[in-house]
Image (cartoon, rainbow, N blue to C red):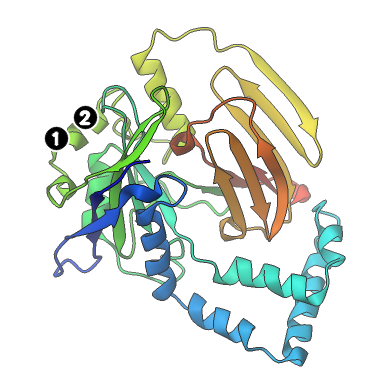
Amino acid sequence: MPSGNFTYVFIPANDSKPIEAVSGDKSGGLSDDALSKEAKQYFFKNSDKGARAAALENASPEQRKLLAQQLRDEVKAQVDKSPYANQMLQLDDDALIGIMKTNQTSATCEITALTVPTPLNNHRAVSMYSDDNARTQNLAYNRRATELLVACGHSISSEPSPSRVSIGSAPPGGICGDAFVGRCHDDEVGDIWERVDFTVEDANPRAEWCDVARQPGGGGGGGGSAGGPRSLSGLMNQNAGAITDGGNNNGFDKGEGDGYSWSQNDEEVELRFPVAAGTKAKYVKVHFARTTLKVIVAGQTLVSGELGGTAEVEDSTFTIEDVGSKGRELCV
């Protein structure tokens, strides 16, 4: 287990405030990452989630009963669209309130991959952490964080789409609100995941690592595209093609499991789950690990277990899409 401290940076949205270097303990590794925890707690404290948590915790028995019934009414409207609605209707009031607290008061954040690890960047992944409710809270535009995003080759020119939410890709229009940026050494072959320094100097869009990120196989956005922001898996596939001799990727397989469908080729495995029409990204929790996967929607575990091989965690993502009259579909 790595030991010692590492440096990451805090980029305020307010240009008059300097970019700050912050120190974290690297001993937690990937499973208990200090930067991820700090970012989530920071955005939680600066939102209204704390007040909502207190309100739910201090609700009277009558108020809790009313809230549970309101949630049941919402779920009933989705019975024909979600296979999990009937399961939720069987839960008691305390369980429903627990789901509500999890969905509305949990500490979360948006994670944007500035770079994914490749041989060209010495397997260094750089990620940006920002408020996942930045636009709904009308937080200020973060010029410096957005410039860093663009310097890594990501496109921010696409308009937000209400029918598709891509987790892990460049937010259309750039970054709003304060942001944290950190770096890790992530080498799947060498079985290495360790936090390494990302300094104030690294936060300069003209830094050398940004130049590398824009190169083919450099791990960044490759200069962006007219198609808008790309998922982590899309970035990795592009980079892999640039640094290997390729190979036969025509192998394809697919099938169905209990409440989901799946498909895979030589590069990716994809799971699709039908979810309720009103499902939003903040209701979804996907725990990616190298050998396991757990998917939770509205407090309900849809799948949990071991993978058939090892996954590249930084390359894993999920999206939510509208599927016509059927509601929505979660793609992992």
- Residue at screen point 68% across, 60% down: 298
Q: In this view, does 193 lie above or below 42?
A: above
Q: What element carries label 2?
A: helix
* Pointer 1 with pointer 2, Cβ within 8 A: yes
Q: Where is residue 197 in the image (x, y as percent from the top left)?
A: 22, 45
Residue 119 seen in this snapshot = yes
Q: Where is residue 268 in the image (x, y as percent from the top left)?
A: 56, 25
Q: Position of residue 67 (x, y in %)?
A: 73, 81
> For mark 2, does the 10 Å Cα neighbourhood hold few (<14), some (14 to 19), or many (20 or more) residues?
some
Quarter of the image where one finds residue 131: bottom left
Amino acid type assigned to the residue bearing label 2 in the image: Val
Foreground: 139 or 85?
85
Residue 212 is marked as 2
> Is 199 on the left-hand or right-hand side of 172?
left
- Residue at screen point 41% across, 67% down: 41
- Residue at screen point 63% across, 12% down: 251
> For mark 1, does the 10 Å Cα neighbourhood hold few (<14), some (14 to 19), or many (20 or more) residues?
few
Residue under circle 1?
208
Quarter of the image where one finds residue 9: bottom left
Measured in 3D between alpha carbons, the distance from the residue under mark 1 to the one under mark 2, in whole angstroms, is 7 Å
Foreground: 281 or 53?
53
Q: In this view, does 252 lie above or below 202?
A: above
Q: How many labels does the image show?
A: 2
Q: In this view, does 256 lie above or below 79?
A: above
- Residue at screen point 49% across, 78% down: 50
> Is 95 on the left-hand or right-hand side of 176?
right
Q: What element carries label 1?
A: helix
